Amino acid sequence: MNTLTIVFAIIIIALTIASIKTVIPNSKASKACLLGYRATCSFAPISTIILIAADISVFLIAKRLTLL
């Protein structure tokens, strides 16, 4: 594995974890998300979709460069 492949893999993993973390319930959140409960991110469905889209984009770029 070369360094660029490792960097892309780390970015993909980080974006996946971040997208999952946005929908985790958090009772200490300042306000409820658009889904109706207090999540870690108050923009829960929107931020989750944005992170998943970024994740897919990075994966497709890495695949196009034939790194994965």
Image (tube, grey):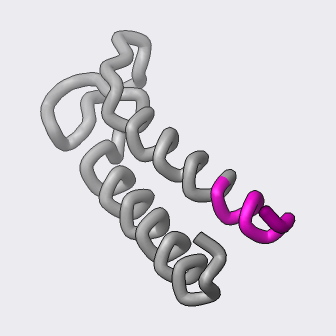
Quarter assignment of residue 28: top left
Quarter assignment of residue 46: bottom left
Residue 20 image position (x, y, % from top left): 39, 38
In front of the other: 5 or 17 = 5
Residue 56 image position (x, y, % from top left): 42, 69
Q: Residue at x 78, y 62 (%)?
A: 1
Residue 64 image position (x, y, % from top left): 54, 88
View extreme (top): residue: 27
Q: Residue at x 76, y 61 (%)?
A: 7
Residue 65 image position (x, y, % from top left): 63, 87
In front of the other: 46 or 61 = 61
Q: Residue at x 31, y 43 (%)?
A: 44
- Image-based side of 1 in relation to 42, left or right: right
- Image-based side of 46 in relation to 59, left or right: left
In front of the other: 37 or 62 = 62
Q: Is residue 5 magenta?
A: yes
* Residue 16, placed above or below residue 7: above
Q: Residue at x 50, y 39 (%)?
A: 17
Query: Image quadrant for the C terminus?
Result: bottom right
The magenta span reads 1-9
